[in-house]
Image: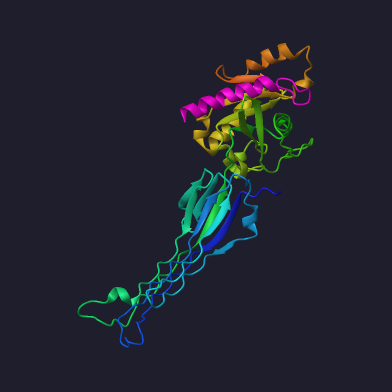
Amino acid sequence: MKFVDYVTISVKSGRGGPGSAHFRRAKYEPSGGPDGGDGGAGGSVSLVGDPSLYTLLDLRYNRHHKAESGQPGQGAQKSGKSGTDILIRVPLGTVAKDGETDEVLGEITEEGQEIMLAKGGLGGRGNVHFKSATRQSPQYAQPGTEGEEREVTLELKLLADVGLVGFPNAGKSTLVSSLSAAKPKIADYPFTTLEPSLGMVYLGDWRSFVIADIPGLIEGASDGKGLGIRFLKHVERNAVLLFCIPAEEEKPGEAYSTLLAELEAFSPHLLDKPRMVALTKMDIVGPELAPEWVAQARTRFPEDIEVLPVSAVAQTGLGPLKEALWKRIEKDREEA
């Protein structure tokens, strides 16, 4: 499935049905009073959260959404049928903005949550409502009101507990595939991951969390270089950031600082998120040199940053990494 995280759609709600200017006519009541019913309300257009969706792909090919108009009122005070509402299903983490003003209309974060994009027009009142002591036979009824029409921009920001941050070929995709059942594309060339992928990590005892493989960053990503800010926005929604620094990196401390600087340049509040470091590709170092190498590498990072060595290929260090991530996630959930 192709990952689509940005799309603009056109929505239009239905017009309200006109009221009826009808008069009661019966065999023994040829000049009965007004009995016109109300027009039906126009259908509305809303977003609704669906956790089974992970992309806005369907909306790329279905951009126009028009709800039904309400039906006219009828005699005998019968109301017209209301137009059917349209519910546009979107993934959790979808932000809706007005296409012209860029005003945020809302964001979908929970299953079943709804955001109204265009409210249906009101049905007009029938002439029965306008009868009075001085107006016994009102000849008119209200027309229905127009519906709303607007362009709406939808932007998806992934909802994941852990977001992986690192340069291209830092071993993020391999790590995700080892921790979860996700199958991201893996190859030995830059920007293998061209779109984010989610994986569910299970620890047993009913414990689980969602991990997101974010495409690799390069220096200047916050200015649009490489894959740029297109994917930096997904990091905003992660509870914990896991920096992946490969064992082949000659200056791990500087690599970490560069990644941190790109996040700060994009959004300073990202520095408030809990951070951990995974030293990936430890199979390159070998089991004999690993303890000494890790001890030396840990001195290159701030003392308050937890550093864990892992090898997705050799399947080492994965258990401790999952437990450490779970502790951070649990703490974040408690604070939230």
Q: Residue at x 46, y 27 (%)?
A: 335
Q: Main secondary structure of the magenta part?
A: helix
Horizontal and vertical percent position of residue 13: 48, 64
Residue 100 among magenta residues: no
Above or below, 237 against 87 in this view is above
Residue nearest the viewer, comparing 74 with 57: 74
State the residue at coordinates (78%, 22%): 314
Q: Which residues are magenta?
A: 309-336
Position of residue 307 measured from the top left corner of the image (x, y, whole percent): 63, 19
Residue 238 sits in which quadrant?
Answer: top right
Of 229 and 129, nearer the camera is 129
Which is nearer the eye, 194 or 51? 51
- Residue occupying the far front of the picture: 28
Q: Can you see residue 204? A: yes
Q: Can the viewer see residue 255 in this picture?
A: no
User: How many discs appear?
Assistant: 0
